[in-house]
Structure formats: structure tokens, C-alpha cells
Amino acid sequence: MQTILSVERLRKAFGAAEVVKDVTFDVRPGEIFGLLGPNGAGKTTTIRVILDLFKADGGSVSVLGGPMTRAKLARIGYLPEERGLYRDMKLEACLVYLAQLKGVPADVARKRARVWFERFDLAAHKDKKINDLSKGMQQKAQLVATLLHQPDLLIIDEPFSGLDPVNTRLAQEVIQEERQRGAALVMSTHQMRQVEELCDRIVLIHAGRSVLFGPVDQIRREHADNAIRITATGEMPALPGVVEVERKGDTRTLHLPQALSAQDALRAYAAAPGVSVEAFERALPTMDDIFVKVTGAAGTGARAAD
């Protein structure tokens, strides 16, 4: 299958500190790919090697069919976690200038920018200095700068940082539209709910090594316990060894003993007098659960340089 980015057994050290030890993954056109890991795992270093800001000490990186070139950089959009806009420039002038650096004529960049300004509610602020914009507006401006030259590969680091729920939803829509356009997106984030909603596949890096790689749904199934989620009315019978671990209204999450299959449990509950089963599914772990289980991380909120 065609890949737009391929990373093979990547290694990178700074002095005696080997930050990236063995990272392998690939990204395909038209997919949203999650680059995940705890603080200090090596994600940012991996991104900087991909962008040719750092030279690898081992392994290989293929971008858009081969080694990185200046022409290929113009086909990549990069949204860093740390905002990279010129803070003393006016918003429109700054974004047009950055698009020109990517090979977009000024008049074309200006037209595209104004379309995005309307969509992101930035039109009234186009003549303000970047430094005078709120944190959320700066994040939206950074996202526009990443999209303006219509890149084939987008690398977006914490894209929802500083956004309220309305603008988070808007950013999600834009990311999905870029996938539909055929672009490949590499998204680095600690928001595991966004990973579940948006990502097709992920790689999880821990201590400089890729420890999980594959489709999100497949990974969740592989890490699932023998548990079910059932919505039912009526008095459900007690089955030997079944432990109720969570209940919300008529919906229960039940942990089953290994001797009892999900199908056997469904038959028993459906046959019980006075019980009406309305919904039944296997209870899959969240990506947050898997993240903590695999990495031993206490949480996914704080972030440090890696």
C-alpha cells in the first residue's frame, strides 16, 4: 500500500542520551495517524528528524517518496505546539508571508486566508498584531498558517490546545476535511478521546521505542478484557462469577469470568423473565486506559519537551 511517510528503526541521540532508540511506523495518504507517547518518549525528536531539523543517527525516513528536499518541505504543513507566528506582524500579512515561503503567490494566499478567516471567525482581527490576539485566536491563526498552502502531509502537534468546545469541533471538522482531500495527517496529542474519534491508526512511543502500532479499533479489541456493556430493563439474574464494574441508569458494564462467553451471558439475560435487553456490546477499553496500561504513565495531561 502506498505510503506518504515511512519511518524505519529510527535512532537519535544527544551526547550520551539516546532519545529515540527504535521507532518504526508508516503513514498513508488520506488517513489521520496518531503519534502518541508520554512526556519524554521521543515524539518531538521524531518529528524534528522527519522535518530534517535533526539528522538521524540510525534507521531511515522516507517522506513523499524519498529523502527530504526543499521542494518537499513546501508540501508539508507543520503545526508546532509552541506557536511559531511572528508576534509583531499583523495577522493577514503574517500568514500571507508564510504562504509565500511555501510557494503560494501573495494574491492567492490572501484570497485563501480570507476564506479561512471567515470560517474561523478571524475576519475582524486580520489587521491586528499576532501578539494582540487571544490564545484561542492565535491557535486558530496557527492552524490557518498550516493549511494555507494546501499541503500533502500535515504534522499537527496538540492541535486543540487553547480552543473552546465550539472551536475544537470546528478544528475537528477541518482535520477530517483534509483527510477527505487526500492529505495525510500526523497528529500528536495527549487527548485520547480525540484519538478515538479521529485517528485511523496510531503508533505509541515509550522510552524511545514504538510499542504499539496499528488501527485504533484493532488495538482496543486486542487489549479488551472479557467484559460486556448491556442496556436492559427489569431485574437481571445474578450469573456466577459476573462482577458489575459500572452502572449508568439501565446500562451496566459487566466483567465476565473466562468460562462465560459474551454470547452465553446474552442468552441468559435475554431468557430471564421480565428482562428486556435493548443494547448489548463488547466493552472495549478506552485509548486512555491502554495508554496508561502500556506506558505506566499516571496521566496524559501534562507535557514536557521530548
Image (tube, rainbow, N blue to C red):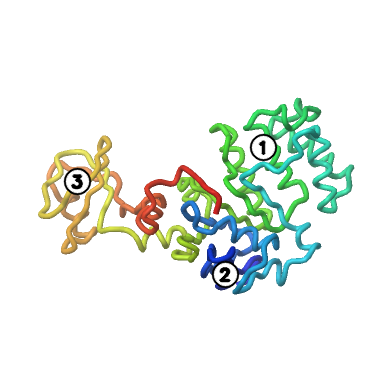
Amino acid found under the numbered disc labelled 1: Lys
Amino acid found under the numbered disc labelled 2: Arg
The residue that disc 2 covers is: 11
For the residue labelled by badge 2, is the local secondary structure a helix, a strand or a loop?
Answer: strand
The residue that disc 1 covers is: 140
Image depth: mark 1 or mark 3 in front = 1
Residue most extreme to the front: 16
State which quadrant residue 159 falls in: top right
For the residue labelled by badge 3, is the local secondary structure a helix, a strand or a loop?
Answer: strand
Measure the alpha-carbon separation of dots 2 and 1. Answer: 33 Å
Q: Residue at x 67, y 67 (%)?
A: 55
The residue that disc 3 covers is: 244
Image depth: mark 2 or mark 3 in front = 2
Point out which mark residue 148 bears: none
Q: Residue at x 76, y 59 (%)?
A: 73
Q: Quadrant of the N terminus?
A: bottom right
Measure the alpha-carbon separation of dots 2 and 3. Answer: 45 Å
Residue 125 percent location from the top left of the image: 75, 27
> Residue 67 vs residue 303: left or right?
right
The answer to whether the residue labelled 1 contacts the one labelled 3, judged by CB atoms less than 8 Å apart, is no
> Residue 267 vs residue 31: left or right?
left
Residue 268 percent location from the top left of the image: 16, 53
Q: Residues within 10 Å of mark 2 (few under 14, many from 20)?
A: many
Amino acid found under the numbered disc labelled 3: Glu
Measure the alpha-carbon separation of dots 1 and 3. Answer: 44 Å
Q: Quadrant of the C terminus?
A: bottom right
Q: Residue at x 22, y 45 (%)?
A: 245
Q: Residue at x 78, y 50 (%)?
A: 149
For the residue labelled by badge 1, is the local secondary structure a helix, a strand or a loop?
Answer: helix
Q: Residues within 10 Å of mark 1 (few under 14, many from 20)?
A: many
